Amino acid sequence: MSYRLELESKALKEFDKLPKERRVLLGEVFDDLQINPRPPGAKKLAASDGYRVRCGDYRVLYTVDDPAKRVRVYRVGHRSDVYRRP
């Protein structure tokens, strides 16, 4: 059972600003999230109902809607910036 991946507009803008090499690696992370939305190494965030997955120094923050089979990515960025409120 595959999940549908959705990137919010903010996450898409952040993703587009990243270096090409990093975008390729994060693309692989997105592909993996469609198959398993809670992969080994994913952590539940304490302050929200979302999860985070690491890719080197970068993080992908997302929520999972199991009944709708949807993964919604709401932030993508460097670990020093991604947890800050906009």
Image (tube, rainbow, N blue to C red):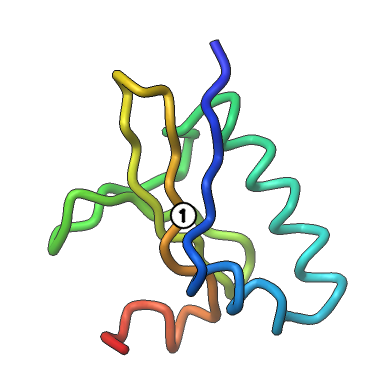
State the residue at coordinates (46%, 44%): 41
State the residue at coordinates (48%, 74%): 10
Query: In x, y percent, where is residue 31?
Result: 69, 38
Image quadrant where residue 78 sits = bottom right
Vertical relation: 30 (above or below) 18:
above
Query: In x, y percent, where is residue 5?
Result: 55, 40
The residue furthest front is 9
Which residue position is annotated with label 1? 73
Say what secondary structure mark 1 lies in. Answer: strand
| Left or right, residue 58 beside residue 68 | right
Query: In x, y percent, where is residue 65?
Result: 31, 32
Around disc 1, counting alpha carbons within 10 Å, would you say few (fewer than 14), some (14 to 19), or many (20 or more)?
Answer: many
Instruction: Give the amino acid type for the residue marked by disc 1 in the picture.
Output: Val
Query: In x, y percent, where is residue 28?
Result: 74, 46
| Left or right, residue 18 beside residue 80 | right
State the residue at coordinates (42%, 79%): 82
- Of the 4 image quadrants, the one containing the C terminus is bottom left
Vertical relation: 50 (above or below) 31:
below
State the residue at coordinates (86%, 74%): 20
Q: Nearer the viewer, residue 22 or 40?
A: 22
Image quadrant where residue 81 sits = bottom left
